[in-house]
Image (tube, rainbow, N blue to C red):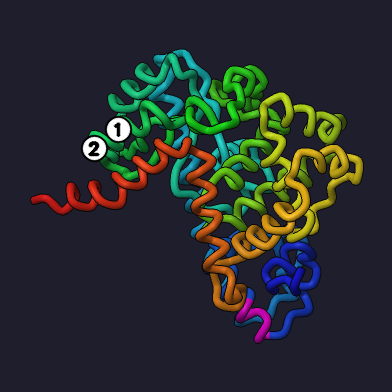
Amino acid sequence: MKRLPILLAALRDPGQLAHLAPADWDLLLRQSTTANLTPSVLALIEERGLLEHVPPQVRAHIEWVRPLAVRHRQAVQFEVARIREALARTGLPVILLKGAAYTMADLRAGRGRLYSDVDVLVPKARLGEVESALMLAGWAATHHDAYDQRYYRQWMHELPPMQHVKRRSAIDVHHAILPETAPARPDPDKLRAAARPLAGQDGLAVLAPTDMVLHSAVHLFFDGEFDKGLRDLLDIHLLLGEFGAAPGFWEALVPRAQELELGRPLFYALRYATRLLGTAVPPRVLEQAAPLGPRGALSWLMDRLFERALLPEHPSCADAWTGAARFALYVRGNWLRMPPLLLARHLFHKALISPRTEALP
């Protein structure tokens, strides 16, 4: 593997931030801005007590992102409270996913994280009731095309994204963590049954630690777009570092992945978290996960693809093959989400029919 970009080197070892030259800081901040990780870099600096070692001009720049990170955190807390109020009439716990879960559970992965929406998990049989309750509280669907509605409601693992008509905040309502058409079918009933209520926050819950890591791995390695790939890999790195200190976590991780049919994304999560971010994973866990990954030439190929696509989308992190790697993984992501005939139909519709429909007066 070639030399890591300066941002990844800093995420692996934040202590070296105290010794960077101004030119190195300039490049690091350009890379972190591209990856939406500057607030996370600030959080790491403060966590390690390194702020006084940052050059004054750099410190002035990165401290500009502090209000942004605080505002995002406050916005998530506010929106989660409104969602909880809206769904109170259903009697369902609000199981938070991804970034909102990290923030509300006060996990390290939530510190400095930026958000575009709030994700929740509910039973599929209650989707209509949940959607109605959210609509009464001011959220409305954002995809009005008949094909898009069918695409989400018949094949996907979530309702069409909803946006509040006044605040413009977004919510994704999931009934599973992978589409109905995906080859892996992790049982959402098992995820909900193992979910843990948040202390002091009635009606709110998050996935169990192992399931939170697995969902983060699924979100990253079943997707086809990697503009936020490094942020998602950093989530996994921080979750593993925090949960790994709890008794029984590492012993339960691989068996839980196999139970939920998520061995392959876990393998990738462990492999690239350790290779790119230096995540401390016990050797026995890596040995357990090794048979879950690809072998031979396919393993070599996936390393070439992911180790390019997971880097920031900055010219200093790219080579002649980066564009091809990202495109190949985009095709792979769509392939994993839908069988060939449905995928061909979907791509045909989005490429040729949807643009014409949107252009109509």
- Residue position marked by numbered label 2 in the rendering: 144
- Residue 24: in magenta span: yes
Circles 1 and 2: CB distance less than 8 Å?
A: yes
Q: How many marks overall?
A: 2
- Residue 259: in magenta span: no
Label 1 crowd bin: few (<14), some (14–19), many (20+), radius 10 Å: some
Disc sitting over residue 149 in the figure: 1
Q: Earlier in the sequence, mark 1 or mark 2?
A: 2
Question: In the image, is residue 340 above or below residue 157?
Answer: below
> Does the image show residue 42?
no
| Main SS class of the magenta portion in the image | helix
Q: Quadrant of residue 39?
A: bottom right
- Residue 177 relative to residue 264: left or right: left
Question: In the image, is residue 271 above or below residue 165?
Answer: below
Question: In the image, is residue 320 above or below residue 133?
Answer: below
- What residue do we see at 41% from left, 24% from top? 85
Which span of residues is magenta-colored? 22-27
The answer to which of 236 and 347 lies nearer the viewer is: 347
Q: CA distance from mark 1 to mark 2?
A: 7 Å
Disc sitting over residue 100 in the figure: none
Name the secondary structure under disc 2.
loop
Residue type of the residue flagged with mark 1: Gln
Residue type of the residue flagged with mark 2: His
* x and y percentages locating residue 204 in the rendered image: 55, 26
Name the secondary structure under disc 1.
helix
Q: Quadrant of residue 38?
A: bottom right
* x and y percentages locating residue 162 in the rendered image: 34, 36
- Residue 87 relative to residue 99: left or right: left
* x and y percentages locating residue 184 in the rendered image: 60, 31
- What residue do we see at 59% from left, 17% from top? 189
- Residue 68 relative to residue 189: left or right: left
* x and y percentages locating residue 269 in the rendered image: 71, 47
